[in-house]
Image: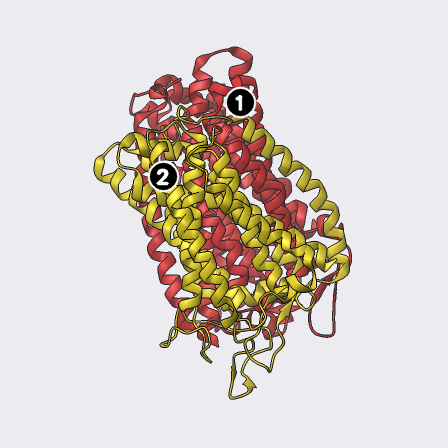
Chain colours: A red, B yellow
């Protein structure tokens, strides 16, 4: 049983982590592409249309990867989490079915037109199809996070005698206090990834003295979008989300922050330190006194509950993992704001394109928003453990009863192999697109 | 309410069979009949802008199944674990074959993705037929051994096959002679369907030959259908009782036969889309007849201990099903609108779309 649950969780974790490398780029990038196309319509400057088409190519590849790795996600609810699906399908099935009907049809119907139809439909309608793709992908994110929010903070349900969750208030799914902060936080974070990628490729072109016009355009666009989005990730959305965790999942909050013992006269904020769960302490800790109380409650000496206040059976199952995930996310988020602020400052002073170290930093920073997004999701998901539906249904009660651990390991290995191949092909092809550059676009 | 969602689910699946069916079929034709680069281009152009949207009908079916019939979703997806995972892998291979082929111009690269696309299409057509066979044949619900359930009454698990390869064995497998037979029917039917789509959407040099292929395969299909009707009673003692009780249902098998008879004259039709119309009619009729023959069951039980899963004992509660009608109605209008726009923009012959050339 233990082993079975472990492989089920590993498979979901692996496939969703890999999958989400792609949508986090496409959701944000679709907005930037629409922006380039809009600029082209306004200025009639061909540079913008070539920029549009260059990023469309990268978008198309990411989108295809997102689609093929996304289908296994919907299947896995049933294949690996059958008991969970049976008990909650009447509720989470609603939002997942809506995702298919409202966003996948929209995206897939217009993607072909967006990618290959410019000649047939003209520039204006090409812009409109881009806008529709953007709408579809953001709607998809919204419905997934509505599903996710219900698992974090179940609303609008009742539980029948046989353990089944049934919906009794449809609109509650969309007024869930967990939903809007999570959604905006996630969308802003997706825009951070895209901005860093756009800026990073721009920096690459300038540093390698190729495609300079485009390098400058990408860099400028990337850092402006990047500064705005990385600020929104922190305030208000990240802040609101953390306050939700304090309110609805205080034990998760204690584990995230590494607070083993309740701190009564104001809690310190831990910057560095490795949790030692057995002895309930942090090694070589660096912390700033009272700041956590202030950030959480707006007053310097409010008590913050530690893990010792909660029964061990409801502690998150992987406290160290949760702590690291959260701290990596916050640390990187802070770094992003710092770097983007400097870059925008140099842009305003008209020195950005000559400030070599910022260009290098932006180039090497490209992978880090992916790490921040991933660890952010790990914070959320590890934080929900040991529950599938918070406080109501344990993860151990949700797995498929008839699928043996051997079969799950077999398919997990299959996914690992297949996704390695996909990853290699993806890198090869993206590298090729970047190497060819925007000038070679046939438009 | 259950019946409404059952009709919706079957409707979505039928559309899926017709739409992604031509994609799979075109892939099989690609594997066996496309010799020149021009032939291959014609095929990928003919399905390029559509396949992704076509596959969404499968996702939509999965979504509706999940929310309207959660018990069936949980039971069948975990029970058919291995074939579903393989279907996923094949769908991935097929999609990347189609999408990545044009990215690098190198004969080895192109050859690899051509085969990936073709073979994955062939196996998918086979697997979907086998899947239909499994649903018709039923499974050992509750995993009964020696008259005792070893699992909850609606759960089961099937290995890929059992040593006897028989649909009447106590311990069933996914693949037995009956389900494999339906898999072959599916491959032949989808080849016809895919060829018709290519004829309809391209001016390819293959078209004359493909009409000949459709004409011949149609006889094979007719023979297979006759055989399948005669072996059906081995897995279901009274396969036609629903049609006898309710003669109106006979419209489904009639569509199926009309499709096959229509294809007899495929070589002489003036309009290139006529063949496609008839093969769509065949698939629609064949799929709905099969569903109607086991109604109200959706997954029959092969033991006497646990009851079959029917639309009534696997459905979600009434509130959820009713509220779903509202958003579904809105979504359906939108989907139909997109569909019309999409097929208008890419109407007519597709030879010049340049799909996959970035």
* Residue count near mark 2 (Cα–Cα under 10 Å), binned few <14, some 14–19, many ≥20: few
Quarter in which the C terminus of chain A is drawn: top left
Report x, y in % for residue A298. 70, 49
Residue corresponding to mark 1: A126
Report x, y in % for residue A420. 33, 51
Location of residue B108 by image quarter: top left
Q: How far apart are marks 2 and 1 (CA)?
A: 40 Å
Residue closer to the observer: B262 or A426: B262
Examine the rendered structure and indicate whether residue B349 appears above or below residue B14.
above
Which of labels 2 and 1 is toward the front? 2
Q: Are marks 2 and 1 in contact (CB under 8 Å)?
A: no
Locate residue B204 relative to residue B65 in the image: left or right: left
Residue closer to the observer: A352 or B346: B346
Residue corresponding to mark 2: B212
Q: What element carries label 2?
A: helix
Location of residue B172 by image quarter: bottom left
Can see residue A294? Answer: yes
Examine the rendered structure and indicate whether residue A404 appears above or below residue B130.
below
Residue closer to the observer: A249 or A161: A161
Examine the rendered structure and indicate whether residue B266 appears above or below residue A255.
above
Residue at x 56%, y 60% (from the top left corner): A383
Residue closer to the observer: B227 or A415: B227
Locate residue A421 relative to residue B175 in the image: left or right: left
* Residue count near mark 1 (Cα–Cα under 10 Å), binned few <14, some 14–19, many ≥20: many
Examine the rendered structure and indicate whether residue B152 appears above or below residue A439.
below
Residue at x 44%, y 67% (from the top left corner): B178
Report x, y in % for residue B51. 47, 40
Locate residue A62 relative to residue B8 in the image: left or right: left
Q: Going by the picture, which residue comes out furthest to the top?
A: A44
Q: Mark 2 lies on which chain?
A: B
Q: Mark 1 lies on which chain?
A: A
């Amino acid at each position: 049983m233990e082993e079975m649950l472990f492989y089920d969780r590993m498979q979901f974790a692996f496939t969703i982590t890999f999958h989400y490398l792609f949508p986090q780029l496409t959701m944000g990038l679709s907005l930037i592409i629409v922006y380039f196309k809009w600029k082209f319509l306004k200025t009639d400057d061909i540079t913008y249309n070539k920029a549009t088409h260059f990023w469309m190519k990268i978008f198309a590849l990411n989108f295809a990867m997102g689609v093929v790795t996304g289908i296994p996600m919907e299947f896995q609810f049933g294949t690996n989490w059958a008991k969970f699906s049976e008990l909650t399908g009447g509720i989470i099935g609603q939002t997942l079915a809506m995702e298919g009907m409202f966003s996948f049809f929209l995206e897939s119907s217009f993607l072909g037109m967006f990618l290959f139809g410019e000649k047939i439909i003209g520039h204006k309608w090409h812009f409109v199809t881009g806008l529709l793709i953007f709408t579809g992908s953001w709607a998809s994110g919204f419905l997934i996070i509505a599903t996710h929010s219900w698992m974090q903070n179940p609303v609008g349900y009742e539980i029948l005698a046989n353990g089944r969750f049934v919906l009794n208030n449809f609109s509650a799914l969309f007024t869930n206090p967990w939903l809007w902060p999570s959604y905006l936080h996630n969308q802003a974070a997706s825009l951070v990834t895209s901005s860093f990628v756009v800026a990073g490729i721009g920096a690459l072109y300038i540093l390698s003295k190729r495609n300079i016009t485009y390098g400058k355009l990408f860099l400028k666009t990337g850092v402006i979008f990047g500064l705005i989005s990385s600020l929104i990730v922190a305030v208000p959305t990240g802040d609101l989300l953390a306050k939700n965790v304090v309110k609805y999942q205080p034990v998760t909050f204690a584990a995230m922050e590494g607070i083993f013992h309740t701190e009564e006269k104001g809690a310190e904020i831990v910057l560095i330190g490795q949790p030692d769960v057995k002895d309930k302490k942090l090694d070589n800790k660096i912390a700033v006194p009272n700041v956590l109380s202030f950030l959480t409650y707006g007053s310097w000496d409010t008590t913050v509950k530690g893990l010792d206040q909660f029964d061990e059976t409801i502690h998150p199952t992987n406290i160290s993992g949760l702590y690291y995930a959260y701290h990596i996310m916050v640390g990187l988020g802070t770094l992003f704001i710092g770097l983007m602020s400097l870059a925008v400052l140099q842009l305003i002073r008209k020195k950005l394109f000559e400030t070599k170290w910022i260009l290098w930093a932006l180039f090497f920073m490209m992978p880090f928003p992916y790490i921040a997004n991933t660890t952010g999701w790990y914070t959320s998901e590890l934080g929900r453990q040991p529950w599938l539906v918070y406080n109501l249904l344990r993860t151990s009660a949700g797995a498929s009863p008839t699928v043996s651990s051997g079969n799950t390991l077999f398919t997990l290995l299959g996914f690992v192999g297949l996704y390695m191949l996909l990853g290699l092909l993806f890198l090869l092809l993206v590298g090729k697109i970047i190497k060819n550059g925007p000038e070679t676009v046939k438009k | 309410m259950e019946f409404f969602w059952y009709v919706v689910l079957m409707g979505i699946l039928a559309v899926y069979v017709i739409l992604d069916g031509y994609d799979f079929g075109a892939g099989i034709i690609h594997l066996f009949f496309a010799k020149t680069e021009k032939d291959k281009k014609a095929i990928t152009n003919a399905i390029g802008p559509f396949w992704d949207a076509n596959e969404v009908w499968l996702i939509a079916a999965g979504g509706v199944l999940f929310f309207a019939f959660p018990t069936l979703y949980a039971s069948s997806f975990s029970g058919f674990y291995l074939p579903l995972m393989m279907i996923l892998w094949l769908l991935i291979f097929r999609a990347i074959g189609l999408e990545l082929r044009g990215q690098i111009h190198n004969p080895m690269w192109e050859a690899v993705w051509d085969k990936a696309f073709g073979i994955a299409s062939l196996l998918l057509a086979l697997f979907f037929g086998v899947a239909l066979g499994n649903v018709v044949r039923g499974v050992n619900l509750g995993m009964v051994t020696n008259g005792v359930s070893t699992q909850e009454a609606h759960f089961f698990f099937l290995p890929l096959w059992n040593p006897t390869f028989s649909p009447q064995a106590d311990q069933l497998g996914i693949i037995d002679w009956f389900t494999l037979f339906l898999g072959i029917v599916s491959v032949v039917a989808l080849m016809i369907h895919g060829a018709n789509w290519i004829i309809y959407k391209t001016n390819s040099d293959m078209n004359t030959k493909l009409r000949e292929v459709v004409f011949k395969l149609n006889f094979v299909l007719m023979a297979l259908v006759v055989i399948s009707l005669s072996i059906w009673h081995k897995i279901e003692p009274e396969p036609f009782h629903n049609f006898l009780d309710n003669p109106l249902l006979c419209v489904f098998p009639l569509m199926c036969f009309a499709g096959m008879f229509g294809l007899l004259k495929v070589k002489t039709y003036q309009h290139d889309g006529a063949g496609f119309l008839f093969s769509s009619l065949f698939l629609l009729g064949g799929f709905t007849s099969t569903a109607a023959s086991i109604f109200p069951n959706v997954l029959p039980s092969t033991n006497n201990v646990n009851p079959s899963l029917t639309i009534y004992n696997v459905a979600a509660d009434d509130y959820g099903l009713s509220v779903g009608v509202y958003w579904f109605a809105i979504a359906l209008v939108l989907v139909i609108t997109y569909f019309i726009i999409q097929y208008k923009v890419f109407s007519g012959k597709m030879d010049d779309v340049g799909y996959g050339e970035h």
